[in-house]
Image (tube, rainbow, N blue to C red):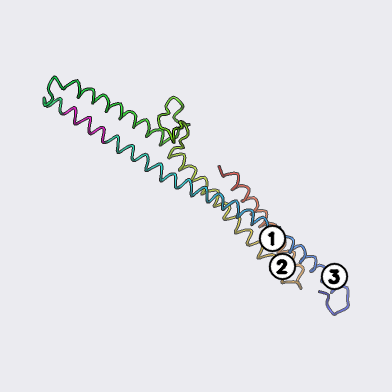
Amino acid sequence: MLNKKDNGETVVVSVASERAEAIGGVLIALFAALMAISQMVNGDLEEEMMIAHNNVVSYSSWYQSKSIKESLKESELDYLGALIESGMVTEENRPVIEQKMTDVREKIVKYESEKIEILLGSEKVGKENWVQDIEGKMGIITGVKEWEQLTKTYDFATKKFDYALLFYQICIVLGAVCIIIYDSPTLQKGLIVLMIIFGIIATFLSIYGYTLAP
């Protein structure tokens, strides 16, 4: 990197340039490593976000199926009541129909309770209101609204990582330019300062995004 001109100024410029190149190379390696870590964490968060989103769809469908069953039972209850009111049911058969109506009412109450637990989650409704199990286990339901909130949280966190990755990429580009422009130490120093600033911003965004993740 030494210039053929044998004078002090040329030697100083050359040494300063070589030092800037070395610093730029170290910073490129550092920020490239941090970017790789951020990409790995961001990938995990995006995977969790997709799982949460799929569960929103799945649990919403589950909730809708309970609503349909509840509506069918309500229609059945109305039909049985109409039979009694119309006089089509004999006194001999009336107790049977009334018992059937009682069973239907219990089903309606059960479906309504199950809907609430599926919508809000087992933790929100409290242990005394657990009515829906998953594979025989009670109290482990994450509600639709909870899944929706998780999806939003993961989405917000991954966006912070996306911005962080952008700043890391800018750092690497600035470092590459710093190494290329070896004959301008002043410009190299400016690029190094910019690298450090963008790198700090990227690191802060990565940490912030990680703290936001559930």
Q: Residues within 10 Å of mark 3 (few under 14, many from 20)?
A: few
Tell me which corner region of the image, top left, top right, bottom left or bottom right, holds residue 133: top left
Give x and y (percent) for residue 41: 60, 51
Disc sitting over residue 17 in the figure: none
Kindly identify the residue that appears in the image at 16 percent across and 29 percent down: 82
Q: Nearer the viewer, mark 3 or mark 2?
A: 2
Tell me which corner region of the image, top left, top right, bottom left or bottom right, holds residue 31: bottom right
SS assignment at label 1: helix
- Is the Cβ of the residue at disc 1 closer than 8 Å to that at disc 2? yes
Residues under labels 3 and 2: Cα distance?
17 Å
Q: Which residues lie in the magenta part?
A: 72-82
Name the quadrant of the N terminus: bottom right
Q: Residues within 10 Å of mark 1 (few under 14, many from 20)?
A: many
Vertical position of residue 68 compared to residue 109: above or below: below
Q: Which residue is mark 1?
A: 195
Q: Which residue is mark 2?
A: 178
Q: Nearer the viewer, residue 181 or 172?
A: 172
Disc sitting over residue 12 in the figure: 3
Q: Nearer the viewer, residue 106 or 184?
A: 106
- Name the residue type under label 1: Met
SS assignment at label 3: helix
Kindly identify the residue that appears in the image at 85 percent across and 80 percent down: 4
